[in-house]
Image: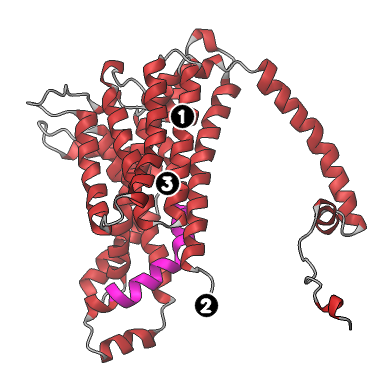
Amino acid sequence: MSGQDSLLPPPTLALGPAGWLRQNLFSTWYNALLTIVLVAFLVPLVAVTLRWIVTEARWGVVTANLRLFLIGQYPFEEAWRIWLSLTMLSVLTGVSAGVYGGATVRTLATWLAAGQALLAALAAVSGLGPAVVLALVANAALVWVAFLAVRWRLRSVSHRLVGFAWLASIPISVILLQGIRGLPLPIVTSNLWGGLLLTFLLAIVGILLSFPFGVLLALGRRSSLPAVRFLSTAYIELIRGVPLVTILFMAAVMLPLFLPSNVRIDQVLRAMVGITLFSAAYVAENVRGGLQAIPLGQVEAAHAIGLNAFQTNRFIVLPQALRAVIPANVGLFISLLKDTTLVTIVGLLELLGIGRAVLAQPQWFGAQLEVYVFIAAVFFVLCYTMSQASYRLETALGVGTR
């Protein structure tokens, strides 16, 4: 072998476009036939769909009612509270992406900024005015401004401080949205909340509260105390044995029958509690599966080195169990997001309920397809964002690998 031959680069393993097509679509005669049949079916379908989207669809039903789709009947003069809460969310998301630095948080930050930019584009062609467009664009930019500020200037921000900020943002957002007597914030009753705002609130509260409650139920079901184990098991099996619609109906209609006449619980709060209690039972079963996957030898080894039961669960068992059930829990939370549409049965107008109310307007009769396509697109973007963040988190934690 000559010296010139020894300097040749190693063969490349990358496939060009023709090689990719040959390997994936035309590898055998039946794969080639199936590809041709599918292309012959999909090309006309895509052409008809695009023609309908561009030339035939009445998207005015969305642009003319965009405010209803976004915030429901929330007073427009008080909508600055929603934008302020959204600003806080944008800043915290950007700071979290800079502090934690993981691909998962950056994915969420990217999609949050992109979603607000898309809403700004929709607002620009609707009647919401330039102030709303500028507010959404500014919030989208704030995500990356906060990220760059942390990465370049504020690298010493502690993880614990960011966590406390997220916890504090929840009551602050609720106070902003609802108002408090004695402060220059008029009360906005929750029956005026609706649209995407209500969908977000129900989903976020349900996810944040059901997860720790479900973990406690899973630990309780495996407890050595008979009373704790019995109560946890009874709760999980009872809740999992009835549909969510039943729980929402009981929370909205039957619960007031057992309360004193002078006690009234907010309807949105009742829906949040019902969704949380229902989802916690399923989280508990997912987490219990992860707990059973931990070898008993690890628990015995932890006890042998002097760790008590709390320390064993905190530092040995739970980190591995929760890591193993990330895909199952994310799938459950995606289902929870979609199940928020069921609250329309108790009189709450979330995104789907607003769509039905819009279709009741005489000038938009026959625009069902446009409304439901828009709602489906919104849910697809939200669910796809959660799934992509889950994939990034699984990759970062090495889920499924040794």
Where the N terminus falls, by quadrant?
Answer: bottom right
Left or right: where 63 falls relative to 300: right
Q: Which three-letter amino acid code belongs to the residue tagged 3?
A: Leu
Q: Which three-letter amino acid code belongs to the residue tagged 1?
A: Leu
Helix, strand or loop under label 2: loop
Helix, strand or loop under label 3: helix
> Which mark, residue 352?
1
- Location of residue 321 in the rendering, given as x and y in whole percent from the top left corner: 40, 71
- How far separated are the C-alphas under marks 2 and 3? 31 Å
- Location of residue 132 in the rendering, given as x and y in whole percent from the top left corner: 38, 20
Q: Which residues are magenta?
A: 313-333
Q: Which residue sits at x=22%, y=25%?
A: 189
- Location of residue 67 in the rendering, given as x and y in whole percent from the top left corner: 40, 20
Q: Which residue sits at x=34%, y=60%?
A: 236
Q: In front here: 315 or 290?
A: 315
Q: Which three-letter amino acid code belongs to the residue tagged 2?
A: Arg
The colour scheme applied to this rendered structure is: secondary structure
For residue 188, what is the image quadrant?
top left
Please give the residue where the numbered disc 3 appears in the rendered image. 336
Please give the residue where the numbered disc 2 appears in the rendered image. 402
Residue projecting furthest to the left: 182
Helix, strand or loop under label 1: helix
